[in-house]
Amino acid sequence: MNQKTIVQQSIKSNFCNLSEGAPISYVLIDKRLLKVGDHINFSLFFNDALTHMSLFLQSDTVIDEEHRRKLKEIERLYVHQNEKSVYETFVEEELQRTVEDASLSLNEKVDIIYSSTSQLTDSLYKNPDALENVQRSKKIIEPIIETIFHNEKTIKSFIKIIGYDYYTHTHSLNVSIYALCLGSEMGLNEKKLNDLGCAALLHDLGKSGIEHNIINKHGALSQDEFEKMKKHPSLGYEIALNIGIKNKDILDGIRHHHEKLDGNGYPDGLKDKEITLFPRIIGVCDVFDALTTKRSYKAAIHSYDAIYIMKTRMPKHLDINIIDTFIKMLHD
Ligand SMILES: [Fe+2]
Ligand SMILES: [Fe+2]
């Protein structure tokens, strides 16, 4: 099996929370994160041939060689919904170890980081008002930054992985990875990158307050629906304030990612220099991800065609220098 197929399968298996036959109260997890010596404080289940859940390991167990060997034979591993947050805390800690693990190849690391952080991003958007999300978004961003910082080829590996598979809830994670790659290419320091990553991860938080049928509509929105949709940046800004985000750069990134340089954007109709760096970066990454993402109702556009469209059709909307840096990043 080639790398692309492995990545596709792993992303699919991690994003389709519920596989065929799995009761709704179980959540599919990434078994590659479980290593010998890990102490798990959640129980693990597998889906047996009779399509009912069987206990694989009891909570409060240390994983040994024998467990690891058996794990290889189990295709899908689950935790109970009630223990999902305990598992997520484990993933956050494990991600840090994944970054530092010298025995993993760069592609393996990027793959594990991407699929695990996608799950965390998903639950962050499902519970957007929770205060712990500020902390959680930092934990999602940190391993990505660390991997980007310490490996020259990471940008390419991440971009390759993002291009493979597409689910709505990965959009925010994709945008934050693009933004971090761009920010790193532009020479932003680690503190700024952290803030940028959080802003990008949370940029569409306001969509959680928009009617589901509008968010998921296949095809063009009616004028009325579009007016409702246009509220998501200011709604996201309110949510961010409510959960205690005070950083101006992050708030700007959330509120202004749909502003356009010619003043025709929303919600505040900002122009030129009134649009700060974070919304400019996020704006470019947002459009790029939307164009290159396959949806059930539209095909994905190739990266270079997307860049061409952005350069030729959107020069009055997007920051052309940032698009040029994006091109350089794809080429390098
Ligand atoms: Fe948006
Ligand atoms: Fe977006």
Image (tube, grey):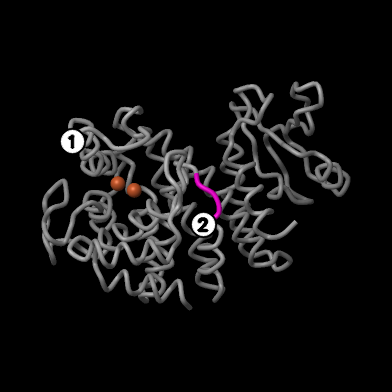
Label 1 to label 2: alpha-carbon separation: 30 Å
- Give neighbour class at mark 2: few <14, some 14-19, many 20+ (Cα, 10 Å): some
Q: Residue placed farthest to the right in the image?
A: 66
Tag 1: residue type? Glu
Q: Which residues are magenta?
A: 162-166
Q: Is residue 77 magenta?
A: no
Viewer-proximal residue, 24 or 139?
A: 24
Q: Is residue 165 magenta?
A: yes
Tag 2: residue type? Gly
Residue at position x 59%, y 60% from top?
Answer: 110
> Residue 76 in the image: x percent, y percent?
72, 37
Q: Earlier in the sequence, mark 1 or mark 2?
A: 2
- Indicate the quadrant where residue 125 lies: top left
Viewer-proximal residue, 283 or 331?
A: 331
Horizontal side of 252 relative to 16 (left or right) equals: left
Could you tell me which secondary element the residue under label 1 belongs to? helix
> Residue 262 in the image: x percent, y percent?
12, 60
Horizontal side of 115 relative to 55 (left or right) equals: left
> Residue 289 in the image: x percent, y percent?
40, 54
The rendered magenta stretch, by its main secondary structure, is classed as: loop
Image quadrant in which the N terminus is located: bottom right
- Disc 1, disc 2: CB below 8 Å? no
Residue to which mark 2 is pinned: 163
Residue at position x 67%, y 25% from top?
Answer: 22
Horizontal side of 311 relative to 52 (left or right) equals: left
- Indicate the quadrant where residue 114 lies: bottom right
> Residue 64 in the image: x percent, y percent?
84, 47
Residue to which mark 1 is pinned: 227
Could you tell me which secondary element the residue under label 2 belongs to? loop
